[in-house]
Amino acid sequence: MKLKNKKLLISLLITVVFITVFTILWKTGKDEVYYLCGNFSAGETKSNVIRQLETANLSSYTNKADVNGSSIVFSSRLFFVTNQCIIKLDKSEKVVLASYK
């Protein structure tokens, strides 16, 4: 095999590995947000929501207070995964709505 062909083959293998790893990370990050968001229904406590969100490996959350209660935005830490779960809480810190975007 010629040196040029070996370089081309190595470049092709590196590209395939990179695309495969990228795809797996993207899918895992997206699934983590989707499935955890599906766990939350109306009436669940904020502490239960936080406890479940703390189990995430590739995602994080922010908690924002407002006049009607608060909201938790749960999203992937991976820059290329834009999906997020918005969890609305009432003043008594119970889930009102959890929506996946």
Image (cartoon, grey):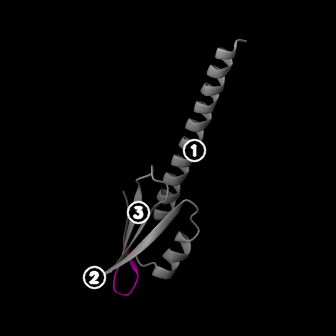
Q: Which mark is residue 24?
A: 1
Q: Label 1 sits on what residue type?
A: Ile
Q: Which residue is mark 2?
A: 68
Name which of mark 1 and mark 3 comes first in the sequence.
Answer: 1
Q: Which residue is mark 3?
A: 85
The kind of secondary structure element at disc 1 is: helix
Between 33 and 92, the one lying in front of the other is: 33
Q: Is residue 76 magenta?
A: no
Where residue 54 sits, quadrant-wise, is bottom right
Q: Is residue 95 magenta?
A: yes
Q: Mark 1 or mark 3: which is in front?
A: 1
Name which of mark 2 and mark 3 comes first in the sequence.
Answer: 2
Q: Are marks 1 and 2 in contact (CB under 8 Å)?
A: no
Q: Could you tell me how far apart the alpha carbons at marks 1 and 2 are, in whole angstroms?
A: 39 Å
The kind of secondary structure element at disc 2 is: loop
Q: Say whether residue 77 is visible.
A: yes
Name which of mark 1 and mark 2 comes first in the sequence.
Answer: 1
The kind of secondary structure element at disc 3 is: strand
Between 34 and 83, the one lying in front of the other is: 83
Q: Furthest residue to the top?
A: 2
Q: Which residues are magenta?
A: 90-96
